[in-house]
């Protein structure tokens, strides 16, 4: 038991929670874009349809990931009991409301002809606006959940929710683009793809700004700094997220934006798919890296600083090993 | 109602880990779980360097951040100030583990043997595992509860009783006559990282 370990890492939240935060972000982002595009007229029609088809299922699967992470999943129904102080409880209510709205929106738009009447369209619009409010709440919640954790100084920053909201919009965008290309690219969808590629580029730039601001703020205090140094030492974060998840998609989006239907529909679709998939994987890596680099604070009293006992799996000593036969 | 607290005299503590072991023995905590931990700190440079041991446990905070974040209401504070987890309500989300700045909480889903190479659990481990699962459940959040069962029987917490240096003193905070209150006052006891704002009820006496 060697107590001299710098900044013990948390190891209770891993991939399952990263996937939950990621899918909550994708669902919220895709729905927001879909709902906003539904006010843009016929040219963005397809993106609305695809976005609605992504939003609800992403949330549902994300919630299943959370439940899978619970130590006692049968108690999941208790998750909303204390919304007064707990962000998981608040998030449970926000996501539940959002799931209902996105589901109703999807059903009304795709499976009924309510939208053909003026009154029906107004109702759908109201649902869309309420849905966007809940979607923004969901995207922000995935970040606030972390920033409200007193035990992990790295997460305790108001920038985390900003990073997660921007990243949610980026991944939502990529998810819609992926859905659009996979459902078949025609000459008309190329135009929509180009618009979305332009928007995606702009938002990735915002994400880079947000993440740089987050990391440089972390570098200013000793405890978060340790996590920030760790995250920058992770190849998964630097190459997987920064290079493959942000830089390469931006270049590919640029290619999509510069193309015309004449440059070959199949080629454009391939470039868009690769860019979107890389961007999505990048979003998942971001969340996973932020989670696993969360280190506990240094305890101190009267000038003495005490690091924590390393809780990670240490090689077990040889006691009890049977002698070789 | 008495509000329980503890004083740990760092002048007396020599870092023997007896409290860690006593806690594990009394509460049958699984491998890797230390409700009573001992951290080591250093200040200064040779020849004026000092090494200091710091025993830590759940601080039974007056404003517990673990309780604040618990979505199910499983984490509760009793009238005597002890923060407990109601095993019938905890869903194992581990948010409280992230919220405790003193690192006092653990959540264990699988009991692994103390012995290497996949050896089966020894009879003692089997017994400990069973008793742990009965008391704390599987996959729930757990933490030091100031040895509730022992206090109810009129005994001292296991770590206090085991400390060979008498560095740990357990008692009540709201009685001006109690040893805890007198020591904190006389020796100007401090809490760990007061900036967390959790108002811990474990105080430390520091060499000055
Ligand atoms: S030390 Fe941690 S677990 Fe104990 S009461 Fe305070 S916040 Fe809760
Ligand atoms: S793990 Fe249990 S005690 Fe901790 S916050 Fe979740 S429900 Fe509450
Ligand atoms: S008071 Fe009891 S449960 Fe808490 S650290 Fe001491 S021995 Fe362990």
Image: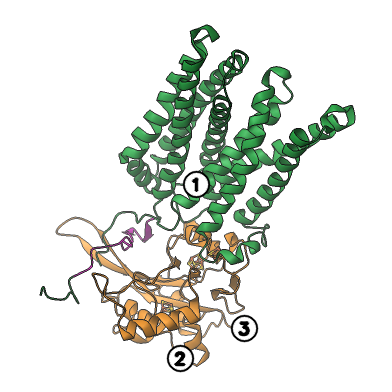
**Alpha-carbon distance for marks 2 and 1?**
47 Å
Asked whether disc 3 touches disc 1, contact meaning CB atoms under 8 Å apart, the reply is no
- Residue that label 1 marks: A19
Q: Colour of chain A?
A: green
Residues B81 and A187: in front is A187
Position of A11 compared to B74: left or right? Answer: left
Chain in orange, by letter, is: B
Callouts 2 and 1 in the same chain: no
Q: Residue at x 56, y 45 (%)?
A: A142
3 or 1: mark nearer the eye: 1
Quarter of the rendering occupied by the C terminus of chain A: bottom left
Instruction: Look at the numbered disc 2 and say if its residue's Cβ is closer than 8 Å to ligand 3.
Output: no
Q: In the rendered structure, which segment of residues is drawn in magenta?
A: A297-317
Position of A89 compared to A127: left or right? Answer: left
The answer for which chain carries disc 3 is B
- Neighbourhood count class around disc 1 (C-alpha, 10 Å): few under 14, some 14–19, many 20 upward: many
């Amino acid at each position: 038991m060697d107590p001299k370990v710098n900044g013990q890492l948390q190891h209770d939240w891993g991939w399952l929670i990263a996937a939950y935060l990621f899918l909550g972000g994708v669902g919220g982002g895709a729905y927001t874009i879909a709902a906003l595009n539904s006010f843009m007229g016929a040219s963005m029609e397809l993106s609305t349809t695809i976005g609605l088809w992504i939003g609800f299922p992403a949330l549902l699967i994300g919630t299943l990931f959370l439940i899978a992470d619970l130590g006692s999943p049968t108690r999941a129904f208790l998750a909303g009991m204390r919304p007064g102080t707990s962000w998981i409880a608040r998030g449970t209510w926000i996501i539940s409301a959002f799931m209902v709205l996105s589901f109703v929106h999807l059903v009304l738009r795709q499976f009924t002809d309510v939208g053909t009447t003026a009154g029906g369209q107004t109702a759908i619009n109201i649902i869309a606006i309420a849905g966007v409010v809940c979607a923004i709440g969901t995207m922000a919640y995935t970040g606030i959940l972390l920033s409200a954790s007193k035990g992990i100084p790295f997460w305790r920053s108001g920038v985390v929710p900003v990073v997660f909201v921007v990243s949610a919009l980026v991944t939502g965008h990529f998810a819609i683009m992926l859905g659009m290309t996979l459902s078949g690219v025609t000459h008309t969808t190329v135009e929509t793809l180009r618009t979305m590629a332009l928007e995606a580029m702009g938002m990735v730039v915002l994400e880079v700004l947000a993440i740089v601001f987050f990391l440089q703020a972390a570098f200013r205090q000793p405890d978060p700094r340790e996590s920030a140094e760790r995250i920058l030492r992770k190849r998964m974060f630097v190459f997987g997220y920064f290079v493959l998840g942000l830089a390469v998609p931006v270049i590919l989006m640029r290619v999509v934006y510069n193309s015309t239907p004449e440059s070959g529909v199949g080629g454009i679709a391939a470039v868009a798919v690769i860019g979107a998939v890389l961007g999505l994987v990048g979003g998942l890596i971001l969340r996973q890296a932020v989670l696993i680099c969360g280190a506990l604070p240094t305890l101190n009293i009267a000038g003495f600083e005490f690091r924590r006992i390393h809780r990670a799996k240490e090689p077990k000593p040889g006691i009890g090993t049977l002698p070789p036969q | 109602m008495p509000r329980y607290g503890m004083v740990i005299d760092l002048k007396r503590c020599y870092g023997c880990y007896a409290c860690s072991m006593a806690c594990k023995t009394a509460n049958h905590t699984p491998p890797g779980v230390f409700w009573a931990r001992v951290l080591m700190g250093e200040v200064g440079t040779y020849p004026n360097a000092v090494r200091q041991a710091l025993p830590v446990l759940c601080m039974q905070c007056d404003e517990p951040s673990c309780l604040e974040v618990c979505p199910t209401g499983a984490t509760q504070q009793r009238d005597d100030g002890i923060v407990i987890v109601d095993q019938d309500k905890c869903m194992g989300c581990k948010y409280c583990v992230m919220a405790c700045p003193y690192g006092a909480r653990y959540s264990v889903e699988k009991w692994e043997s103390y012995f290497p190479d996949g050896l089966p659990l020894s009879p003692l481990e089997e017994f400990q595992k069973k008793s742990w699962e009965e008391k704390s459940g599987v996959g729930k959040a757990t933490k030091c509860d100031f040895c509730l069962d022992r206090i109810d029987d009129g005994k001292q917490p296991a770590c206090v009783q085991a400390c060979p240096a008498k560095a740990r003193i357990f008692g009540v905070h709201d009685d001006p006559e109690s040893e805890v209150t007198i020591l904190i006052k006389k020796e100007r006891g401090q809490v760990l990282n007061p900036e967390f704002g959790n108002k811990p009820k474990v105080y430390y006496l520091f060499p000055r």
